[in-house]
Image (cartoon, helix red, strand yellow):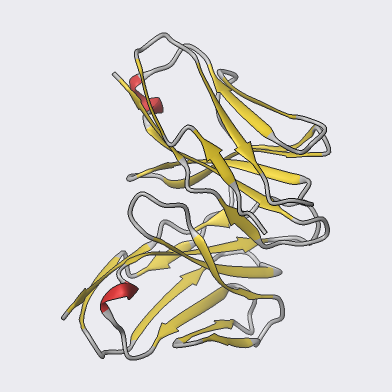
Amino acid sequence: KAGVTQTPRYLIKTRGQQVTLSCSPISGHRSVSWYQQTPGQGLQFLFEYFSETQRNKGNFPGRFSGRQFSNSRSEMNVSTLELGDSALYLCASTGTGNTEAFFGQGTRLTVV
Amino acid sequence: GQQLNQSPQSMFIQEGEDVSMNCTSSSIFNTWLWYKQDPGEGPVLLIALYKAGELTSNGRLTAQFGITRKDSFLNISASIPSDVGIYFCAGQSAPGNTPLVFGKGTRLSVIA
């Protein structure tokens, strides 16, 4: 059974640009959560999607958005990038009725 | 928001030694999860705990769900070099769709 797949693995963007990250969950998992990981703050919850609907949202500005497709794949978008957005962005998928979250390898975003 | 206090922040141990780390919260959790993250990778689920007092093992790893439901412990016995990494605790405060809350991690270094 394939794990959670995130693309791309690495990205370099300049300030002001926007970026889209992709996540394919484990087959059969309908919940996808996104996290931002930085050395100082640890894993910070961005949002969670279930059946194409945003079910939970963390405390991030509106520049961070996401969506989920009918096949449960999810994308997150960050607009007007700032230097502080440089981080490892992790996606996790969870089976219905379950708590155990399984993570992808992450996308390392560097904003210059 | 809810916070998990994870300690110690880092530890240096000799190969073969046992390791203990813990996570505490000011509020009650229904689920505790322990993850390990290697450099440049996403966190990997090690152990999941669902009941107060539960003690669960996974090889040389043992984790316990505290009876107050406000803490959890992870022990690693007879550490080996590949145990190096960052260990995270995560908790869910209510059953259902509540997002996981993560501790800031314990960085483990093993000296051969």
Q: Residue A82's spot in the image, x, y percent? A: 39, 18
The image quadrant where one finds the N terminus of chain A is: bottom right
What residue is rendered at 74% in x and 51% in y?
A: A27
Quadrant assignment, res A2: bottom right
Quadrant assignment, res A32: top right
What residue is rendered at 32% in x and 91% in y?
A: B78
Q: Residue A31's spot in the image, x, y percent? A: 74, 46
What is the residue that sits farthest to the front in this orientation? A1
In this rendering, is residue B46 above or below B55? Answer: above
What residue is rendered at 47% in x and 43% in y?
A: A106
Question: Is B44 displayed left or right of A57 in the figure?
Answer: left
Q: Residue B66's spot in the image, x, y percent? A: 59, 82
Taking the image as drawn, is residue A58 in sight? no
Q: Residue A101's spot in the image, x, y percent? A: 64, 57
Residue in front for this viewpoint, A14 or B63? A14
What residue is rendered at 81% in x and 32% in y?
A: A53
In this rendering, is residue B17 above or below A54? Answer: below
Residue in front for this viewpoint, B4 or B102? B102
